[in-house]
Image: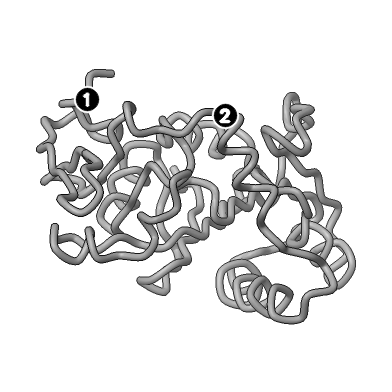
Amino acid sequence: MKDNKCKICNSVTTPIINKKTNVKYHTCSYCEFTCKDEKHFVTKKEELTIYNFHNNFIYDPEYIAFFKKFINKAILPYASNIIKGLDFGSGPQPVLAELLKREYNYKMHIYDVFFAPEKVYENNKYDLVTCTEVVEHLKNPLEYFKIFKSLINNNGIIAVMTLLSPNNEKDFFDWWYIRDKTHISFFTLKTMQVIASKLGLKIVYTDNKRYITLKKVNK
């Protein structure tokens, strides 16, 4: 898709340039999705190097608390009879999947393009798909949301964690989240609402900051 077309809603986007870094982005006035220009993407090798510096471990109490809050807010109240789940983009240490297995007796599969590349989700259906701090790394996020929808059972949920973006240029360029060179896609709540509408999903929960839980629309 051309840079001047929004990857979510196909509307014409507006280029904006961060004068501090000279990094160019494309922002959509309709769905409020913003993406980094592809000429500023890091290579896959650079991306992997950055991920390998992340120190996220199952025995880190702060990291466990970070995920437990997500579980309690975005998963448990909206999960009915969850037995089988997929953690998509599980990272070098699949902490969330391990917590769900260890403390909630979920049967979890994991997938990560670098650290668990076997596509275990193919020919599978899930009661839960989690995607935490992942969608901001995706070049074509709408295509992945389509995959997530195809993977959940009718009563299943998709639980997403990504920091929602400011919707004005000044705040966006001052936002710490864009400083991570691997972050290329940025969403407001409206972006998520448009994604949900396009795909036959509905948002059943959001904290308006970082958590979004989606279900299929009942027909």
Residue visible at 66% across and 71% down?
67
Which amino acid type corresponds to the residue marked 1 in the rendered image?
Asp
Secondary-structure class at tag 2: helix
Q: Is residue 29 left or right of residue 180?
A: left
Residue matched to label 2: 44
Vertical placement of 144 versus 56: above or below? Answer: above
Residue visible at 22% across and 59% down?
173
Of the pair 84 and 81, the residue shown nearer to us: 84
Give residue 88's position: percent from left, percent from top.
66, 44
| Residue 141 quadrant | top left
Q: Is residue 104 left or right of residue 187?
A: right
| Residue 7 quadrant | top left
Would you call the spot at circle 1 few (<14 residues within 10 Å), some (14-19), or many (20 or more)?
A: some
Give residue 31's position: percent from left, percent from top.
20, 46
Residue visible at 48% across and 42% down?
137
- Asked whether the residues under the numbered discs 1 and 2 touch, taking CB atoms below 8 Å apart as contact, a structural biologist would say no
